[in-house]
Amino acid sequence: MEISVIVTAHKEGELVQKTLVSVFRAIKFAKRTLKVELLIILDKADNETRRYIYSYQNELFCRIYEVDFCDSGLSRNFGVSKANGRYIAIFDADDLMSESWLRLAYKSLESFNKPAVVHVDKCFVFGEKEIFYKQCSSLDKNFDISKFF
């Protein structure tokens, strides 16, 4: 298994449907050349979110786990503990993934000679405010580690 995709869900409701469509599309694209698994972690999910997730259960080749952590970090770590992939891709149930992201991330990771984290190049945050920004790579000359503190 090359990639384990972990999606954590809580109280996203109908929004999780758009996330799953984007994740499925990216997995289908990646599976042309890679072995990919999908794990969905329902962390004290509300009934609406749970209903959307389980409505896809018969169409998916995924594993669904229900936990009661109420903590995104613990939910992600739980998913990692259940994953079989060489690489882990973590998404929240309100994230969208481009079709080619998994394959491009895999190619990037394979090109490094040491452990690495890859992330999306650009982010679009939507909701009450809409924000579009470019993330800076730690390899970029303009990278400022103080922004993490």
Image (cartoon, rainbow, N blue to C red):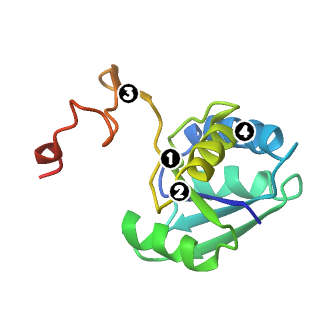
Task: Quote the CA–CA distance across marks 2 and 4.
Answer: 18 Å
Q: Nearer the viewer, mark 1 or mark 2?
A: 2
Q: Which mark is residue 99?
A: none
Location of residue 148 with respect to 8 vertically, above or below: above
- The amino acid pointed to by label 4 is Ala
Task: Quote the CA–CA distance across marks 3 and 4.
Answer: 23 Å
Location of residue 86 with respect to 90 vertically, above or below: below
Task: Quote the CA–CA distance across marks 3 and 1.
Answer: 12 Å
* Quadrant of residue 82 within the rendered picture: bottom right
Task: Quote the CA–CA distance across marks 1 and 2.
Answer: 7 Å
Location of residue 35 with respect to 28 vertically, above or below: below
Task: Quote the CA–CA distance across marks 3 and 2.
Answer: 17 Å
Task: Between residue 130 and residue 111, name the one nearer to us.
Answer: 111
Label 3 close to label 2 by CB (< 8 Å) = no
* Residue 74 spot, x, y in % from top left: 41, 73
- The amino acid pointed to by label 3 is Gly
- The amino acid pointed to by label 1 is Glu
Question: Which residue corresponds to mark 1?
Answer: 12
Question: Which residue corresponds to mark 3?
Answer: 127
Which residue shows up at 31% across the image and 33% down it?
Answer: 136
Residue 70 appears in the figure: no
Q: In the rendered view, does 125 fall on the left or right side of 26?
A: left
